[in-house]
Amino acid sequence: MELHKFVEVESEKRTSTSQWSQDPIKDVVIHLSVLQTNVALRQFSSLENIVVSGFSGRASGHAYKIENFGLRLMNNANEVYTMTVPNTILTRGDAILAHASGQNSWIVPIWENPNFVLLSTYLSPIWVKLKEIMKLPANWDSYGAVPITTRTIAKTIEILVESFKIQHRLGYERIIPFVAPCADGSIQAEWEIGTKQLEVVIPASENEKISLLRVSEDREEFKESTISSPEEISDYLLWLLRE
Amino acid sequence: MKKHSSGLEKISDEDGLYRTIHPLWIKDKGITSAAFKQRPPLDSRLVGRHSLGLSVDIARLTTPEKVLLSHPGYGIGIITASFVLNLKLVIFHAPEPSNYAHAIVFGKITGSMAKLIARSAKLLRYEEVFSPILPQGQ
């Protein structure tokens, strides 16, 4: 079975103005009438920060049939942008890549939970890596490592989105972290700015906390700590980003 | 000369240790500390060698070619026993049927320790070990 099949969707812009690409989006609506489900929406100030999570789908075996799956994006001028996924069958592990003209977005079904996660263009390089990580078989490190679950991938995405929210708020360039799997099924994300480094380990177990390591190379200082939720990472990223 | 009475190899400060490095652990500059992190598995059914500690090979008992023979694209992280021992970790020889050089770094490897080990490690890439042999004159 192909685990990560991408389906390009057709997009259709239903607005007569040309402001779309400049205005921040204030609302996101996912039409999931066929799936008959609820979507928890988190609203952010721009397309690049949109995440839709908390989707609970109606599973029938290992396949979902999606008919006329529509994604409607609205900016603060109430211009509506609609993307439609053609009739398709998604099997476990499939992902849909949605292209809006000039602004790529990602819709990633995370099947174990399952969640739909809509991510921004600049997460796509990391998504490429996360796809590789998701495919790792047992004993991938030759020392008996366990595979990485989609739950851990989804948690990692939450952390990354938090990091991008903070960077966006502070007006920073996007700093793409290095992402690596760990032998125990956790995922490590690493940021490095100047003499500062931040390592975040997203555990495979829900019962474990997220662990962090801050390194100040100039002071030869190593500080370890833990947090319970992805939102708590903001203080550590602020430490990393600020002079 | 470098053997315990048990027949197992003694590991001295001067020994080099090889750790197989998965391609996803290789960074632009060196190796991620994730390569040197070991924690107990979540599911006892999935217990592997890694649950015992950090698996390495004793350099003087093997070769880079042997280590990477069945792992194309992987690398080797070369660390010194003295560096590991200075972190108050223990290394013991744990030969396996197919790998006499196998050893285990035992002890709680914290995030800071893994970072220090990664920083000290020298990366030997697969291409460096198995570089193509060009005919003479080329």
Image (tube, helix red, strand yellow):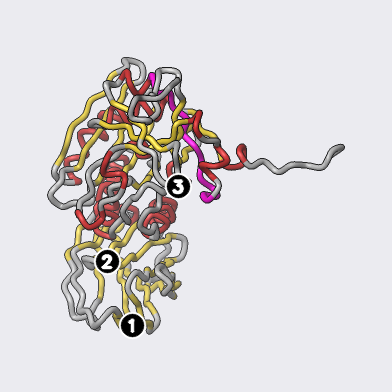
Q: Amino acid at mark 3?
A: Ser
Q: Nearer the viewer, residue A94 or A69?
A: A94
Q: Position of residue B2 (x, y in %)?
A: 43, 22
How many numbered markers are drawn? 3
Placement of B82 over or under B99, stated as above or below: above
Q: Nearer the viewer, mark 2 or mark 1?
A: 2
Q: Amino acid at mark 2?
A: Phe
On the picture, is A230 further left or further right than A195?
Answer: left
Q: Quadrant of the N terminus of chain A?
A: bottom left
Q: Residues within 10 Å of mark 1 (few under 14, many from 20)?
A: some
Task: Read off the residue under disc 1.
Answer: A68
Q: Nearer the viewer, residue A237 or B32?
A: B32
Task: Read off the residue under disc 2.
Answer: A116
Highlighted range, magenta: B70-82
Placement of A170 over or under A51, stated as above or below: above
Q: How far is disc 2 from disc 3 in space, using C-alphas?
A: 45 Å
Q: Nearer the viewer, residue A19 or B125?
A: B125
Q: Nearer the viewer, mark 1 or mark 3?
A: 3
Q: Residue at horizontal 37%, vertical 47%? A: A143
Q: Is residue A78 visible?
A: no
Q: Marks 3 and 2: in contact by CB < 8 Å?
A: no
Which chain's residue wears label 2? A
Q: Amino acid at mark 1?
A: Asn
Q: Nearer the viewer, residue A35 or A137?
A: A137
- SS at badge 3: loop
Q: Quadrant of the C terminus of chain A?
A: top left
Q: How far is disc 2 from disc 1 in space, using C-alphas?
A: 16 Å
Q: Position of residue A181 (x, y in %)?
A: 35, 47
Image-quadrant location for residue B110? top left
Task: Read off the residue under disc 3.
Answer: B98
- SS at badge 2: strand
Q: Residues within 10 Å of mark 3 (few under 14, many from 20)?
A: few
